[in-house]
Image (cartoon, helix red, strand yellow):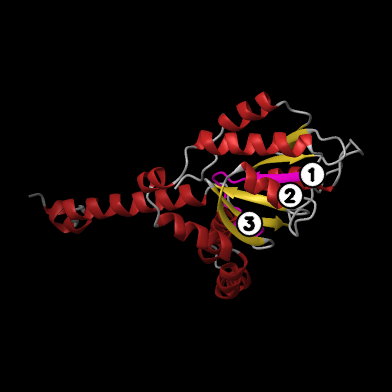
């Protein structure tokens, strides 16, 4: 063996080293997929930027900037654990989930859609206002904690009873995750952007607001006009027919990817 190869033989990876590298890379890839499109992913991007600043401060011997960055990392980690606790909890929960088991334990997606559409039709006929948020890949736990835990199977009758004018939770929103109504009476964020249509009430503004901050799909039933609307990606489509609503919901993935 040539002398230079013997000298630098420790740099040559062994098969076990390659296997470990591939395993760590797969773990990082899976974690990044779970964090994608969440606030935690935005935090991770910010940490990478701060890490780059700290690296260059050491390379260029910028003592003051390096000291500030060290203090930021020292105390920022504790602050991040508190601020992003819902996202971290959701990510850890997804790590323990199995896609095949979930397929056997939940209703078919089309069944969930039919129940939501049927509930919207009934509520519209009786002029009862409602707002239903359907969770997708981005978790809605931080919003669900503002309401009351329900944990009931998605049924049109359940949704009707929640939004009945005499019910204590009828003013808030309902959050659906998979085939389960997880919370009711939920407070949703109102859109921070100007709304051109002055006739839009609080429910519609909340639907737009949630769809701006997350990838959830929000169904709204107007108490005044009995019209059904749907909000996606910050856009509100008003006065949708049952067929249109069904097609919009069937065309998306309602259950979070694990």
Is residue 141 covered in magenta? yes
Q: Is residue 228 left or right of residue 66?
A: right
Q: Which residue is mark 3?
A: 183
Q: Which residue is mark 1?
A: 129
Residue at 86% in and 40% down = 195
> Does the rendering let one see residue 78?
yes
Q: Is residue 241 left or right of residue 13?
A: right
For label 3, the crowd category at 10 Å Cα-Cα, with few meaning under 14, some 14 to 19 and many 20 or more, is many
> Does the rendering let one see residue 231?
no
Q: Quick one: 219 or 68, which is closer to the camera?
A: 219
Question: Closer to the camera: disc 2 or disc 3?
Answer: 2
Residue at 40% in and 53% down = 97
Q: Which mark is residue 163?
A: 2
When asked about the image quadrant of residue 70, the answer is: bottom right
Q: Quick one: 193 or 90, which is closer to the camera?
A: 90
Of the residues under marks 3 and 1, which one precedes in the sequence?
1
Above/below status of 13 relative to 255 = below
Of the residues under marks 2 and 1, which one precedes in the sequence?
1
Q: CA distance from mark 3 to mark 1?
A: 17 Å
Q: Is residue 16 left or right of residue 74?
A: left
């Amino acid at each position: 063996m040539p002398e230079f190869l013997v000298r630098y033989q420790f740099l040559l990876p062994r098969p076990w080293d390659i296997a470990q590298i591939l395993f760590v890379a797969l773990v990082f890839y899976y974690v990044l997929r779970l964090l994608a499109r969440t606030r935690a992913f935005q935090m991770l991007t910010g940490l990478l930027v701060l890490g780059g600043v700290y690296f260059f401060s050491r390379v260029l011997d910028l003592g003051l900037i390096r000291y500030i960055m060290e203090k930021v990392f020292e105390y920022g980690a504790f602050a991040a654990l508190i601020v992003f606790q819902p996202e971290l909890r959701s990510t850890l929960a997804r790590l323990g989930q199995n896609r095949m088991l979930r397929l056997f334990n939940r209703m078919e997606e089309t069944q969930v859609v039919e129940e939501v559409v049927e509930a919207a039709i009934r509520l519209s006929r009786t002029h009862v206002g409602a707002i239903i948020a359907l969770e997708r890949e981005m978790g809605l736990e931080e919003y669900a904690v503002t309401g009351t835990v329900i944990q009931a199977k998605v049924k049109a009758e359940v949704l009707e009873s929640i939004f009945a004018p005499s019910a204590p939770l009828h003013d808030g929103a309902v959050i659906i995750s998979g085939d389960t109504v997880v919370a009711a009476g939920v407070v949703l964020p109102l859109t921070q952007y100007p709304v051109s249509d002055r006739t839009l009430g609080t429910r519609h503004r909340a639907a737009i607001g949630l769809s701006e901050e997350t990838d959830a799909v929000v169904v709204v039933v107007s108490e005044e006009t009995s019209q059904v609307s749907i909000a996606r990606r910050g856009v509100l489509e008003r006065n949708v027919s049952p067929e249109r609503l069904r097609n919009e919901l069937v065309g998306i993935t309602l259950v979070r990817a694990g």
